[in-house]
Image (tube, coloured by chain):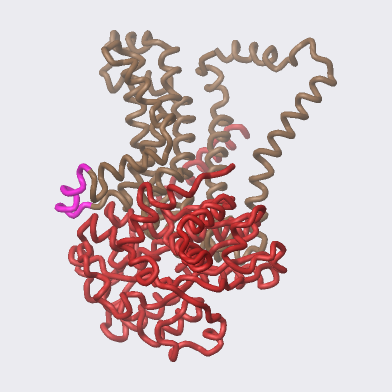
Chain colours: A brown, B red
Amino acid sequence: MVDSARDRAPAARQPARGESLAVRVVLIGIALAFVSLMLVLPLLSVFTEALRKGWDVYVAAIREPDAHSAIRLTLLVAAIAVPINVVTGVAGAWVIARFEFPGRNLLVSLIDLPFSVSPVITGLVYVLLFGAQGVFGTWLAYNDVQIIFAVPGIVLATIFVTFPFVCREILPIMQAQGSADEEAALTLGAGPWWMFFTITLPNIRWGLLYGVLLCNARAMGEFGAVSVVSGRIRGLTTTMPLHIEILYNEYNSVAAFAVASLLALLALLTLLAKALLEWRYADELAATRPL
Amino acid sequence: MTAFCTKRLLDQALAVLALMFCFAVVAGVARAQQDVELLNVSYDPTRELYREVNAAFIADWKARSGQTAAIRLSHGGSGAQARTVIDGLAADVVTLALAGDIDAIAQRSGKIPLNWQTRLPFNSAPYTSTIVLLVRKGNPKGIKDWGDLAKPGVGVVTPNPKTSGGARWNYLAAWAWGQKAFGGDDTKVRDFIAAIFRNVIVLDTGARGSTTTFAQRNIGDALIAWENEAFLVLEEFGADKFEIVTPSLSILAEPPVTLVDGNVERKRTRAVAQAYLEFLYTPAAQALIAKHFYRPRFQQHARAEDLARFKALELVTVDGAFGGWAKAQPQHFGDGGTFDQLYKPAR
């Protein structure tokens, strides 16, 4: 296994034949210029704006109680939404990849629904369902349960928006690998959970990891749907993206960019974790990644 | 061997990262408790005002009752805020831009009695304000009064009357000036309003959004704004960049406050919520109101230099010129109202 991976590597790294040096330089130059203009420059400007008035102002902006609670709420929402989406995403992908049943294609399309529906509509749908004038509004008010304009509503909206990430990442891997390994495990007497943890999970783990990271990044950064169901109560139902907007609207752009830089740092940390994991398990990755 | 060590180190680093995440989440679940908590759902420009008023009230309430109060704030376009309260945002008090928005909450949610406006002095409005024009320094387009906003080539910024309370005051102020200028000729007034809205470049959802568009993003020649918002721009961005143009005639804006009875009953916060609203009429709060560029009801409590900033101008009232919000709201801002008829985005 390891040997074959090593044999493949040099062949893949060889430059494409036929293009002259000039063409390559120009193409690479365009790509680099585009990436730095569209990605690196905005990212840098977030940090320079945040630090414009010095380190002390930056720290003060982040230590402010409302900013603190926004950070906590963002992490809490991600900590609830991501695990739920991992479980449902794996279950969904497994059902779709392994079984034929009526409505299977419909289910595949439904999983993509959160990608195609505008987040604002997502938020409004939850208001229509759980708002005071909504379908369940009277029952919820009678039982003194607050879903919309409180943390549960924010979590629900986030789960909906980030649902496809995990499922979409692992579904192609499951389909490509087929069920031969799993059937072999079952034939050799493994129970369904034993099979899942020793065969299925190891096979999909890289796709699962990407899915989790993407899901997490979006869960922490979601603005539209959360903004509709949040009610914008300062220090209570404002996540980091909402808090950034509030600060900007209060002419407090240094504080706004300070919190924005923190959000960007969280995203970079996610990427870093991914890169570290890839590097740590490079050999396994080469062996298991489907081609 | 070294590869093995770095790998162990990496594993540990990843474990620490995961642990930190868990701690942050746990810390988020455990939060400090207060004796009593109020939620004030307000309109856009009052952020700075209520931040100071809240601190003063919390100290006052602590001295009077011994309770530690915490007051949460939510800000947005007045109409949009009313909508979220109707949809179930658990506001103890609403402090909105105009009576029509609180009427909407009363009618649609039943959480506020219909006679709410009689419950506190001065139509339940502890302060007034008006609508002025903000232009760039030196007034390059020579904007002196409402009539100049309708001229071709003037870029106007105002929020959307459908979602913003301030925008509805803006609209009615322009309408009132038109009625006087054209001697009550309705067709000419309508043409005049249509001409102003043809000049509108950006129609934000709230007053603060419009201010940001005009002052921070440098779009447009004139901003139709709350008087308090215009002064705030001078304070935030420097008086060397903008000028306030006080028109010859404007509207007396009375942003009202009231209890949301349905919510304070459920949350058992009626006493403190009532005290909070009454506090707005005290000398301490009236002085803060003037400090933040709103016109106080009791001028004797405000500092003289704060009062000196307010220019005298002819002010009409919604009740006098438009027959009250109950009539003006559907006639001008309801579905198919004059705004729908006259606003046709040109570009």
| Number of residue marks | 0
Any part of residue A165 in sight? no
Q: Quadrant of the N terminus of chain B?
A: top right
Q: Nearer the viewer, residue B334 or A97?
A: B334
Q: Position of residue A80 (x, y in %)?
A: 35, 43
User: Is A18 contained in the magenta span?
Assistant: no
A112 vs B48, nearest the viewer: B48
- Asked if residue B148 shows in the view, the reply is yes
Residue A150 lies, with reference to residue A115, above or below; the image says below
Please state the horizontal and vertical placement of residue A59, each as a whole percent of the image.
57, 63
Q: Position of residue A144 (x, y in %)?
A: 18, 55
Q: Is residue B238 left or right of residue B261?
A: right
Query: Which quarter of the picture shows residue B237?
Result: bottom right
The quarter of the image holding the C terminus of chain B is top right
In this view, the residue in front, B239 or A30, is B239
Q: Residue B150 appears at what percent x and percent y?
A: 59, 57
Residue occupying the point 67% across, 54% down = A48
**As drawn, B156 above or below B246:** above
- For image coordinates 53% across by 46% down, the residue present is A266
Q: Residue at x 36, y 42 (%)?
A: A123
Is A57 placed above or below A267 here?
below
Nearest the eye: B291 or B325: B325
Question: Seen in the image, is A239 located left or right of residue A103?
Answer: right
Q: Residue at x 53, y 84 (%)?
A: B306
Q: What range of the chain is rendered magenta?
A: A135-145
